[in-house]
Amino acid sequence: MTFNKQGKFVVTSDGAFAIKPEEYEEFVSFLQRDSIGLYIRDGVVLDDSPLQKLIARGFIIPERTEKIKNVKYNRYTFYRPLVDNRKYLGYRQPVENDRRINENDCLKFAESLSVASTTLKKTVFNQVIRANSSPCVFQVNKTLFGDTDAKNIAVLSRVKSMNNTAFPQPGEAYAIVRKKLVVGSAPYHIAFVLYSHNGVNITLEANADDGPEYYPRFGFYDMKKTFHKLFVELYDNGTTIVLQSRLMEDFLRELASENI
């Protein structure tokens, strides 16, 4: 195994990284590797990666030190909670056509992380995550992803590596996409890959319906406990694929033209 449980923690086999899954009353199997904090063993030097860049640029910040079996770890979190200003008519029932900010959207958040790990401007992250609409950041075989649900479903037919074989590289993302839309349910879930270490992908993810003061969560996936195995429990007609980032120069050019 590339990671295992040590008490309340899930730790990579070499002890370099750990997460501390949150306790939930429901969807326990779904959220079992879902952690507000990422623990990096003291002294570990990060390779060039989105994780290294996002720490250097202040998006992922050291919060405190903590010991796991008498070994010192530095605990990192995303630098602020995400904001959801939508009005609700009850539990998770958004008002129709409410255009307020929802930073918890998983695709928007993954797109914003891709931008933030590529450009030095922190303002661009906020611009992208708070936009009601903006150019697509991700693509699949040079076909844009995120424009419409219909186009997202159509792209599934063009992908060879999928489901349990889908294993993105750092800077790419997992996407589980429903082949048929379900009324009242999300059409997809996206997880941005920050780092790969000894066969473990470390992700950072948002969830659109988790409220106004939500900290995004870190997750671990490998080729045995895959992203697809975990999320297909909720996306019962879903297919998991890999999203690649577009050339950031093209995206930023389109973003600037939309805001003239």
Image: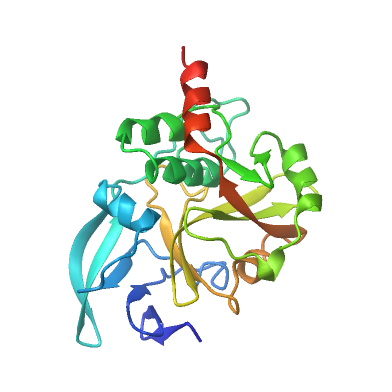
Residue 64, placed above or below residue 122: below
Q: Quadrant of residue 123?
A: top left
Foreground residue among 187 and 161: 161
- Say whether residue 54 is left or right of residue 170: left
Q: Is residue 138 above or below residue 5?
A: above
Residue 115 in the figure: left or right of residue 41:
right
Of residues 254 and 60, which is closer to you in this image?
Answer: 254
| Residue name at image x 53 percent, y 47 percent | 106
In the image, residue 161 lies at what x, y percent?
71, 63
Residue 6 in picture, x, y percent from top left: 37, 86
Please indicate, yes or no, whether residue 257 appears anywhere in the rendered image. Answer: yes
Residue 107 location (% of width, % of height):
55, 44
**Residue 61 appears at what percent x and percent y?**
25, 54
Q: Residue at x 32, y 77 (%)?
A: 16
Does any portion of residue 91 appear in the rendered image? no
Is 202 rendered above or below residue 141? below
Q: For this view, does 9 lie left or right of residue 244? A: left
